[in-house]
Amino acid sequence: MEVELKFRLPNKSSYQKLLSILSQFHITTLYQRNEFVDGSAYELSSQRAVLLLRMYEQPRTPQCVVCLKSKPVLADGVSSIEMENVRKVYNWNGVILEVDEAKFEFGEMYELECETSEPEKVKKMIEEFFTENGIEYSYSVMSKFAVFRAGKLPLS
C-alpha cells in the first residue's frame, strides 16, 4: 500500500521559502502533465478508482507512467482531464521530498509530498522543519484530481 504524507502550502511565498531552504538538497526537477482517464460510463470512478497517465516532459528522456489509483478520496466520475505540474525533488534527512506546483485554470496549488514506510516519524520531522523555519502549512484535504473536479482551490 502506498502511504504518502501531503502538506499544503498556502501560497507562492511559502512555496518559494521552502524551495530556498531546501535548495542544498535538490536532486532534480520534473515537468509533468497528468491526465486522468475513465470510461464513458464512468466505470473506474464508480468503483472509486482513477487511471492516471503521467507524462514526464524531460527533453532527452520523455516518459509516461500509467498508474491505477483505487479507493482514493475523490468525487465521482471523470472522462479525461489534463493538469500541469512542476515537481522539485529533494533528498532531505534520508527521505525524498517532492514539492509540487500544480497549475489549474483557476489558480495554482503548492504541496509537499513524501512517500514513506514510517508516516508518523516522518510527519513529525517535516512538521518540526516547517515550524523551525516559519513555513506556513496545513494538511492536504483534497487530491489534485479532486481539486480539479471541484473547479476551485481548497480553502486554507
Image: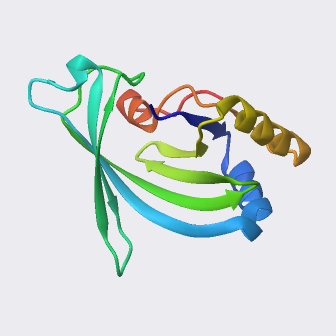
Residue 20 in view of the camera: yes
Which residue sits furthest front? 117
Placement of 3 over or under 65, stated as above or below? above
Rendered image quadrant of residue 81? top left
| Quadrant where the image shows the N terminus | top left
Q: Residue at x 40, y 46 (%)?
A: 105
Q: Residue at x 49, y 49 (%)?
A: 102
**x then y, percent, for residue 77:** 23, 24
Left or right: 97, with 75 as reference point: right
Instruction: Please state the total of marks drawn on the protein image.
Output: 0
Which residue sits furthest left? 40
Q: Nearer the viewer, residue 57 or 69?
A: 69
Q: Nearer the viewer, residue 145 or 65?
A: 65
Q: Residue at x 59, y 60 (%)?
A: 89
**x then y, percent, for residue 139:** 65, 29
**x then y, percent, for residue 15:** 69, 52
**x then y, percent, for residue 52:** 29, 43
Residue 136 in view of the camera: no
Q: Residue at x 60, y 35 (%)?
A: 5
Left or right: 5, with 72 as reference point: right
Q: Nearer the viewer, residue 141 or 71?
A: 71
Which residue sits furthest bottom? 60
